[in-house]
Image (tube, helix red, strand yellow):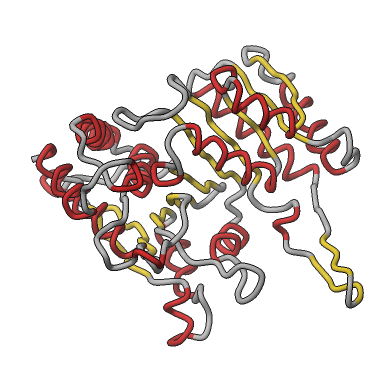
Amino acid sequence: MGEGARRADEGEKLKNITLIKGDGIGPEISDAVLKIIKAARVEINWDIQTAGADVIEKEGVPLPARVIESVKRNKIALKSPVTTPIGKGFRSVNVQLRKELDLYSNLRPCYNLPGVKTRYDNVDIVVVRENTEDLYAGIERQVDEDTAESIKIITRGASERIARFAFDYAVKNNRKEVCVVTKANICKLSDGLFLESARKNSELYPQIKFREILVDNCCMQLVQNPNQFDVLLLPNLYGDIVSDLCAGLIGGLGIAQGANIGKDYAVFEPVHGSAPDIAGQDKANPTAMLMSAIEMLNYIGEVEAAKRIKTALFDTLKSGIKTADLGGNAKCSEFTDAMISKLS
């Protein structure tokens, strides 16, 4: 865990953190979150980097080496959304970051926020997703004109370290259960290996309840009774799908936070897209970016500041100040100003 960012009035060296502004609405929500963090009197030396579709024209690639070098230098990054083309074009910047930095754990806490109407109350699920292999390894080939092939990679090493991460997280955060999610009845070797690794590690944590569920059954039960789940442990592809399902339970991707954590580096980011259709119109919802920043502040030791920002966020939502995606009519700037007024 990184050393806590220090306040300027303490006269200590500022914490250096990479900020990746992304494209689409990325720059807007980045600027909003930076203003809120500053209002909370957390002084950070932001190493601002750009990535994504807008960078290709100038530098030829969506993720220049300078961005990776910045994160390696600073160890911590806060990242806004980057557009990923569908079915063509460059591969996901997110996937490349995770591979380059070995960010093997994707952490997605999903819980209800005040003032956000949902079908369910008291949802509190943490999705732990393996982040480096599975079909996301991108090993594909065109067999012939009518056939394409993708290879699913599951290794014991990656499966065991994500299982340890999930159980360690459960212990440190007073969670009661880890439920491993696979399709091991069909993918008997690949998912079977992931399941075997989870079972093996569960024996090292007798204080944490352990259970197993098939991914299709898990999806059905999530929409029937999400309150039964605590920590979900999944391979990469299932984790991507199920984490978005869980976000839908609490109000959508506009409030869904995310963290990509490895041995040496951590990148915190909202999980929604870059929404280029509303870019520059002051309509973006910065909540997911802000929730990710709150987790980043906790990670670097700024626990009190994180608590103050979270309280201000909850109070703002309770007061009815919400962006259009949450049923309100506030602009991004108005939402940001309301947050800042509660922190001043």
Numbered marks: total:
0
Q: How far from the left and from the top, in percent, is residue 159?
A: 74, 40
Residue drawn at 28 percent across, 38 percent down? 302
Residue 251 lies, with reference to residue 288, above or below; the image says: above
Residue drawn at 76 percent across, 44 percent down? 157
Location of the C terminus (image quadrant): top left
In this picture, residue 103 sits left or right of residue 153: left
In this picture, residue 131 sits left or right of residue 148: left
Residue 329 lies, with reference to residue 137, above or below; the image says: above
Location of the N terminus (image quadrant): top left
Q: How far from the left and from the top, in percent, is residue 113?
A: 35, 30
Q: How far from the left and from the top, in percent, is residue 89?
A: 61, 76
Does residue 11 appear anywhere in the picture? no
On the image, which quarter does residue 340 sit in?
A: top left
In this picture, residue 50 sits left or right of residue 200: left
Residue nearest the viewer, comparing 216 with 20: 216
In this view, the residue farthest toward the top is 207
Residue nearest the viewer, comparing 158 with 115: 115
Q: How far from the left and from the top, in percent, is residue 337?
A: 14, 48
Does residue 20 appear anywhere in the picture? yes
Residue drawn at 73 percent across, 34 percent down? 215
On the image, which quarter does residue 278 sit in?
A: bottom left
